[in-house]
Amino acid sequence: MRVKLCLPLAVVSVLAVALSACGGSAPTVQRASFVIGADSLAGLPMSPGTSYLGASRYFERKGFRSSRRITRDGDCRLELKTIGFSADFWSFANRATPRKCTDFGGAFASGPRWHTANGLRVGASVAELHRLFPHALSGGPWNGSWWGPGVGVNGWYLGPKWPANNHAAHTILIAYVKDGRVFALGEEVSGH
């Protein structure tokens, strides 16, 4: 009697393990949330010196296919449409190629799964932005469609625009607000 009961349970257990192994990491990766910070994107450390190839390889290892295009300014844009993300990398060469796009210019995350480490999410209200970042500094309205935000969007710097007494190039976290909600989160290179 005991053997008859244990055998079906063992078969069900083996099938459950096999099915979860076959389903693997793809469904988990696709449903994950992503943290954007002043110096990181979904776990990838970011700095002005982060290259297109480095970022592209990082996201491919995480299971995301990226597309690349050359912007109107001749730089490389990494796009991950499935998670609502794009990043620009500057090339100081005459002709931009993935190998020559060696300097991070900025990132734009508009997908609903993006959030800051302290919980500010794409789609949050302006009140939530100010509750989580009480010292946020308004960058004012964006006047063009540059590379992400578009017209009618206000940028809010979520960290200090300049590190203490230093104008060296660094990344800064930004919230883009439209119609009273966080439309997107981003990183921008500031300084020189």
Image (cartoon, rainbow, N blue to C red):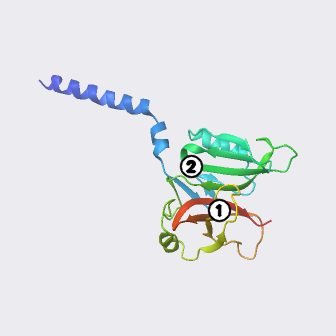
Q: Is label 1 or label 2 in front?
A: 1
Q: Quadrant of the C terminus?
A: bottom right
Give the quarter of the image for residue 47. Answer: bottom right
Against 58, residue 166 (above or below) is below
C-alpha span from label 1 to label 2: 19 Å
The N terminus, quarter of image: top left
Residue beneath label 2, please? 84
On the question of residue 94 being in view, the answer is: yes
Q: Residues within 10 Å of mark 1 (few under 14, many from 20)?
A: few
Q: Quick check: marks 1 and 2 in contact, CB under 8 Å?
A: no
Q: Nearer the viewer, residue 79 or 59?
A: 79
- N-terminal of the pair, mark 1 or mark 2, is 2
Q: Residue at x 50, y 64 (%)?
A: 120
Residue at left 63%, top 74%? 138
Q: Is residue 55 visible?
A: no
* Amino acid bearing label 1: Val
Foreground of the two, 102 or 152: 152
Q: Quadrant of residue 167?
A: bottom right
Q: Amino acid at mark 2?
A: Gly
Q: SS for tag 2?
A: loop
In the picture, the disc for residue 109 is: none
Drawn side of residue 13 relative to residue 44, left or right: left
- Quadrant of res 144: bottom right
Q: 10 Å neighbourhood of mark 2: few (<14), some, or many (≥20)?
A: some
Q: Residue at x 63, y 55 (%)?
A: 108
Extreme residue toward the right, this view = 94
Q: What residue would you read off at disc 1?
A: 151
